[in-house]
Amino acid sequence: MKLPRRRFLQLTAGGLTLSAISRMARAQVYPSKPLRWIIGFPAGGGADTVARIMEPWLSKRLGQPIIIENRPGASTNIAVQTVVNSPPDGYTLLWHGLSSVVNASLFVSLPFDIQRDIAPVAGVVSYPMIMVAHPSVPAQTVTQLIAHAKANPGKVTMASFGTGSASHLAGELFKFMAGIDMVHIPYRGGAPMTTDLIGGQVNVGFDVMVTALPQVRSGKLRALGVLGRKRFDLLPDVATVAETLPGYEASTWGGIGVPRGTPPEIIERLSREVKEGLAQADIKARLADVGTVPMVLSPGEFRAYIAAEFEKWDKVVKVAGIKPD
């Protein structure tokens, strides 16, 4: 049976109105139960530290508890798979960082596509990075470390918080530009790496300021060089690696992602709450105190940033010939 054109338009308009009302109602009742925030690193590391700074604000604003779940392993693939397999309803969040993105270059086959299956919500922080050494290492500067490594090829150990992690990539880039050979020792996160660095089981580490700064301040580790473009405000006397190796730069970052198909109004709600949280004076102060910088990015901006980071570090993975453990 054919419908008159006017009746068809009325029904169509009614359907669109109902759809809009449905979206509004869904956004108004969200969230109605606790959320899970899945982090692919151990407790005590850089991602965990920042998440626990942001969690009270987000829980308060959303009116529901946010339960942080640390699921380290497989270069964060376990955490990503957990979120990919979760319902796209806004109740399961992912700590979306560089390590997860680089895995697309590192692993030949993954059961998911990180840029397709995880929807970016918001940037949270960027992590200035630093090269640190155990005090027993006979080097006070980057130049001295390079000289020491050249005099002892294959004997200096280089720790990272996982194969293919930002820490590992920073180290490989340093080795390539300095023309030295250091033995890579991967760990399952920043916290266990720091423990062994302090204990002297490994010589040098590439870490985020969040976990390295307290150890440098206490004298348990020695700061050799900042990995960013400029010196770090809290360590003004520590030179950048680029002052010795022009053009060198490495950093990492983290944000929030959700399963593909999560309603856009929920993504916008989460993004808005993160943005407002990062503008709070107390949160900004706490993030600065642990050595991070707010990275305010909308869902669209975060997606573009992720694509650019993948392209940059994909080249390092291929040149260094990095393979998963």
Image (cartoon, helix red, strand yellow):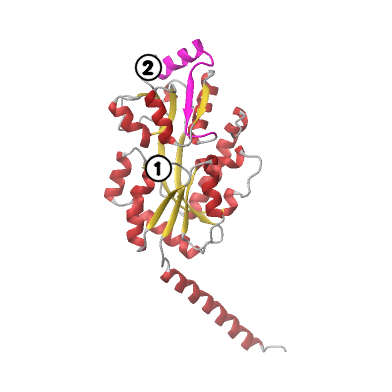
| Amino acid of disc 1 | Ala
User: Would you say residue 71 sits in the magenta stretch?
Assistant: no
Label ID, residue 43: 1
Question: What range is drawn magenta here?
Answer: 141-163
Residue 210 visible in the displayed image: yes
Q: Secondary structure at mark 2?
A: loop
| Residue in front for this viewpoint, 51 or 119 | 51
Label ID, residue 136: 2
Image coordinates for residue 247, horizontal then vertical, percent: 49, 27
Label ID, residue 86: none
| Amino acid of disc 2 | Ser
Residue 232, compared with residue 281, is above or below; it is above
| Residue in front for this viewpoint, 114 or 244 | 114
Image coordinates for residue 21, horizontal then vertical, percent: 48, 76
Q: Who's the residue at 51% across and 34% down the image?
A: 162
- Label 2 or label 1, whichever comes before in sequence order: 1
Label 2 neighbour load within 10 Å: few <14, some 14-19, many 20+: few
Give the alpha-carbon distance from disc 2 to disc 1, as whole Å.
28 Å
